[in-house]
Image: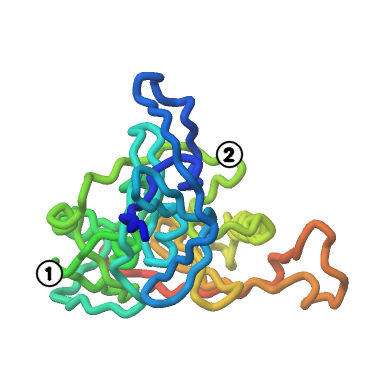
Amino acid sequence: MKKFNIRILVAAVVIGLSFTAGVYAQDVLQKVEAYLRPDFKVFVNGKPVVLTSPPLIYDNNSYLPLKSIAQYLDAQVNWDNEAKAIHVNSRIYSDQLSDKVTDVITMMSASSQTLQYLGSTYTILTIYNAQGKIHYRLSDAHKMGIDTKGLTISKEKYTEDLFVSEEELKKAWKETPKPNYTYDYTNPIPMTGITDKKKIDALNTFVNSVKSYAISDKYYYTLPVLIEPRKEENQFIYWCTVNGKFARYDITLIPYEQLYNRPVDPNGQQYLPSGYTFKQIIPDQPNHY
């Protein structure tokens, strides 16, 4: 009975990433003879799994589709077209945080950034503290797969969110994140983790509705920072500045059908700005603003 070594196949057709052999110089390519084995069973941690492609046998080795097997191993596979590189990144964090808070910081300003890191693009929230040092939100650092164990973790005074300074992150990241300056003309409001076009449209409508307004004789002007989903369905956080002061709206999205008891739009579920509720949770007059 033949024995096969098991390896992960790093090939465009099997990985399922968006690149083709045509992008490579001809002298890099090698033609080989290989065999697909749909009769082979694959187990991950003792459990049978179904892969996107059957195992492939080449040179007495068994190859598995990388992106498919990575999902079962709770890892990410990303293709960096510019560098012609494949990144396999383990997910090292669950929702449970074990990082120890060591101090309290006060934000002076906040902004969103879109960064390229290990082949993936992330839109994150960053702040500057009173000393002018930039801090990443801890949850964003974890989302990027950065191991923050042993780093100095800070709690922000007003939001009570956890942050870690860029200075500290430099000790842990595997490469320096690169800014992504690509502008999304279809969705100019910075958003992360939201893909439903109908929800994006409704959120944009809400943002426009609070862009400027007046209460008594005072006028308020709102500038967007970032919109992101909460864990609860159809609930979102809108980070912004109101007259230069950092603010947060908690928004609840109400489906059109639920609000008016009418059939769902044939193009997909619609959501209306009138279904939103929001509140400002940052103090109106913090001394440092």
Query: In this orientation, which residue lies closer to the viewer: 143 or 101?
Result: 143
Q: Which residue occupies 41% across, 35% down?
A: 81
Residue corresponding to mark 2: 185
Where residue 16 sits in the image (x, y, percent)? 50, 46
Please tell me whether mark 1 sits on a helix, a strand or a loop: loop
Q: Quadrant of the N terminus?
A: bottom left
Q: Earlier in the sequence, mark 1 or mark 2?
A: 1
The nearer-to-camera label among 1 and 2 is 1
Residue corresponding to mark 1: 150
The label number, if any, that marks residue 62 in the structure image: none
The quadrant where residue 26 appears? top left
* Residue contact at pointers 1 and 2, CB within 8 angstroms: no
Q: Amino acid at mark 2?
A: Tyr
Label 1 crowding class (10 Å Cα cut-off): few <14, some 14-19, many 20+? few
Query: In this orientation, which residue lies closer to the viewer: 88 or 165?
Result: 88
Q: Amino acid at mark 1?
A: Gly
Please tell me whether mark 2 sits on a helix, a strand or a loop: loop
Q: Which residue occupies 19% across, 73% down?
A: 104
Is 25 left or right of 272, judged from the image as shown? Answer: left
Where residue 275 sits in the image (x, y, percent)? 69, 72
The answer for how far apart the CA atoms under marks 1 and 2 are is 40 Å
